[in-house]
């Protein structure tokens, strides 16, 4: 009685003989042939589960004996598709599924490689995480199935984990590379139908499945992939696919498209943005670097609003993206003060200030501005107090003046931000009444721009500021409000100080005279009504103002509505002032 007798007993399905052999030699089921196979291994791939049942009932030690390639009886049952035998083995030792052979292959891998769908699904039912198992080269079950063209197994794998289509082994190969290498067109067709991206991947040598097919002269696969790539680009209208890849960080797709269709790197979307803009907009670091390496000049391109990558990055306030862009050889961030302006006249520096990102300002303010007054100006334009506070901490001097003498207080008055004026007053009260180089205080500029709320704020902190005249024409706020036709602003000034009506400028003209000269009819009618009242006292005039507001003196919409300039446009005050001086 020998090992050979055991083989014969299994072949003839003679379980009684197996039992007799064990009775005579209790170690018979642990004996191995020159391949390291035990009788249990042979019973595992036999069609009759009764043989394996008898062996396991008599000696369970043989469950974990491995052959010379380190395979257990579980590998054999799964790899030969013997579902009944596999179930029997798992009933006795569920953990046998974790065992791997000398290449790192599990029972699931053998089932996939040999197209044994029944045993493959049984293993996954018991342990769905087995789908993640890899051999020592990083191959998953899908790699093995794709290499053999086993589409049914591939479908089961996709059902359990759809993103496994992009899993790469240690050489960066996906299942598509394996299918292309082994001329398995049907596997590639399935992958394309499941997710077209699956065939748009690169291995560590930067080879696509098409490149791999060409290396192995697999002509049917070459033809199929060439047509498939063309269809993908055509259906997605080329620029959409490249922009999509840039937006999602699909660097493999970017490289393949750029190699096959270089012009996709220059295609613009509906905003005039190139793929590299899209990558910056979506903070895709890898996409940015790949697109830059493929076509360096695109980093300096602009969209339809003249925004470059620096404007987009500054608007996002993402320091990491700016760090990435700064390191590039041709980066626009290397320009002094990020000098390029978009169609709104904004540099990336001004956009960064507007974003209000404190950390960005602290880390990059030295690059944004060569002059500190520009930093204050950019923050005040948008009325961001938090940003202004940060800039003050960095630059210290909130009284700094621009070339025309405007301080932060002047700018806050121009753009109508009373909360900014309150902040400035706490740190530099005198700034609210300091004239610029043309003799205009913040109150004067607020009157010119119709910012009634700013006039009230300044008057509250500095009484009689509305009655102060400038140093050149001796204009008061009332004169300037009449000149520009701001009815609401004039009413605010009169409410704060009725005597403003009697002030005279350098030409001995009162506010009412200015209204006549510049034909501001509604304002003139309003002032003449006040003039005709018997008593010009403060109490009586307050009643007059109330009465007038309810009479048929209506204010033209074009004059009463606050005219606000776009935050990005600097008010051209001085050209207008000079024109007025010439007419006097």
Image: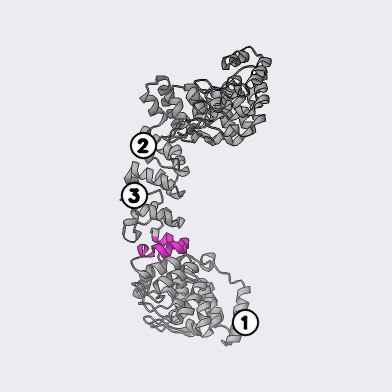
Instruction: State the quadrant of the N terminus.
Output: top right
Question: For the point 64% across and 26% down, which residue is it?
Answer: 59
Identify the image's colour scheme: rainbow, by chain, secondary structure or one colour: one colour
Question: Which one is earlier in the sequence, the residue at label 1 or at label 3?
Answer: 3
Callout 3: helix, strand or loop?
helix
Q: Which segment is the magenta one?
A: 349-368
Question: Magenta: predominant secondary structure element?
Answer: helix
Q: Is residue 43 magenta?
A: no
Question: For the point 32% across and 46% down, which residue is it?
Answer: 297
Task: Kindly report the distance in space between the C-alpha atoms of the residues bearing marks 2 and 1.
Answer: 73 Å
- Compare residues 433 and 229 and report the one nearer the observer: 229
Callout 2: helix, strand or loop?
helix
User: Closer to us: mark 2 or mark 1?
Assistant: 2
Label placed on residue 300: 3
Label placed on residue 543: 1
Picture quadrant of residue 576: bottom left
The image shows residue 461, relative to residue 228, as above or below, that is below
Question: For the point 69% across and 15% down, which residue is it?
Answer: 16
Question: Which one is earlier in the sequence, the residue at label 2 or at label 1?
Answer: 2
């Amino acid at each position: 009685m020998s090992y050979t007798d055991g083989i014969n007993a299994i072949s003839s399905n003679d379980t009684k003989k197996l039992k007799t052999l064990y009775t005579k030699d209790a170690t018979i089921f642990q004996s191995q042939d020159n391949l390291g196979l035990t009788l249990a291994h042979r019973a595992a791939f036999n069609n009759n589960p009764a043989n394996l049942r008898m062996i396991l009932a008599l000696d369970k030690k043989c469950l974990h004996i491995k052959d010379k390639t380190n395979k257990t009886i579980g590998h054999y049952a799964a790899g030969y598709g013997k579902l009944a035998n596999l179930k029997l083995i798992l009933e006795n030792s569920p953990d046998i599924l974790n065992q791997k052979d000398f290449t790192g292959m599990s029972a699931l891998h053998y089932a996939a490689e040999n197209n044994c769908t029944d045993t493959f699904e049984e293993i996954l039912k018991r342990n769905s995480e087995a789908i993640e198992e890899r051999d020592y080269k990083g191959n998953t079950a899908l790699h093995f199935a794709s290499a053999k063209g086993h589409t049914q197994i591939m479908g089961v794998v996709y059902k359990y984990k759809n993103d496994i289509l992009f899993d790469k082994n240690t050489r960066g190969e996906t299942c598509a590379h394996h299918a292309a290498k082994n001329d398995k067109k049907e596997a590639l067709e399935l992958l394309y139908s499941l997710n077209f991206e699956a065939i748009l991947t690169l291995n560590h040598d930067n080879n696509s499945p098409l490149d791999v097919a060409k290396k192995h002269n697999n002509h049917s696969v070459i033809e199929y992939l060439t047509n498939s790539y063309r269809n993908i680009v055509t259906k997605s209208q080329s620029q959409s696919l490249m922009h999509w890849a840039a937006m999602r960080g699909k660097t493999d797709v970017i490289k393949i498209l750029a190699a096959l269709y270089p012009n996709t790197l220059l295609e613009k979307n509906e905003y005039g943005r190139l793929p590299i803009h899209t990558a910056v907009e979506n903070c895709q670091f890898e996409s940015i670097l790949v697109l830059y390496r493929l076509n360096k000049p695109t980093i300096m391109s602009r969209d339809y609003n003249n925004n470059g990558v620096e404007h987009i990055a500054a608007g996002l306030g993402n320091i990491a993206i700016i760090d990435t862009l700064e390191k590039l050889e041709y980066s626009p961030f290397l320009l002094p003060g990020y000098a390029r302006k978009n169609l709104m006249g904004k540099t990336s520096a001004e956009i960064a200030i507007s974003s209000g990102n404190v950390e960005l300002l602290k880390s990059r303010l030295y690059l944004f501005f060569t002059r500190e007054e520009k930093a204050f100006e950019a923050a005040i334009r948008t009325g961001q107090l938090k940003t202004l506070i940060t800039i003050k901490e960095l630059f210290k001097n909130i009284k700094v003046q621009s070339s025309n003498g405007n301080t932060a207080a002047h700018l806050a008055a121009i753009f109508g931000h009373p909360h900014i004026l309150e902040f400035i007053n706490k740190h530099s009260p005198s700034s609210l009444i300091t004239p610029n180089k043309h003799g205009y205080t913040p109150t004067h500029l607020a009157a010119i721009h119709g910012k009634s709320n700013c006039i009230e704020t300044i008057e509250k902190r500095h009484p009689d500021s509305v009655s102060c005249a400038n140093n050149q024409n001796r204009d008061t706020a009332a004169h300037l409000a009449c000149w520009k036709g701001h009815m609401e602003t004039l009413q605010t000034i009169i409410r704060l100080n009725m005597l403003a009506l009697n002030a005279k400028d350098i030409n001995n003209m009162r506010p009412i005279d200015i209204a006549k000269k510049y034909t501001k009819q509604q304002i003139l009618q309003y002032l003449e009504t006040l003039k005709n009242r018997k008593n010009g006292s403060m109490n009586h005039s307050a009643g007059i103002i109330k009465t007038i507001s309810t009479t048929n003196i209506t204010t033209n919409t074009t004059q009463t509505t606050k005219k606000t300039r776009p935050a990005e446009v600097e008010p051209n005050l001085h050209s207008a002032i000079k024109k007025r001086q010439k007419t006097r």
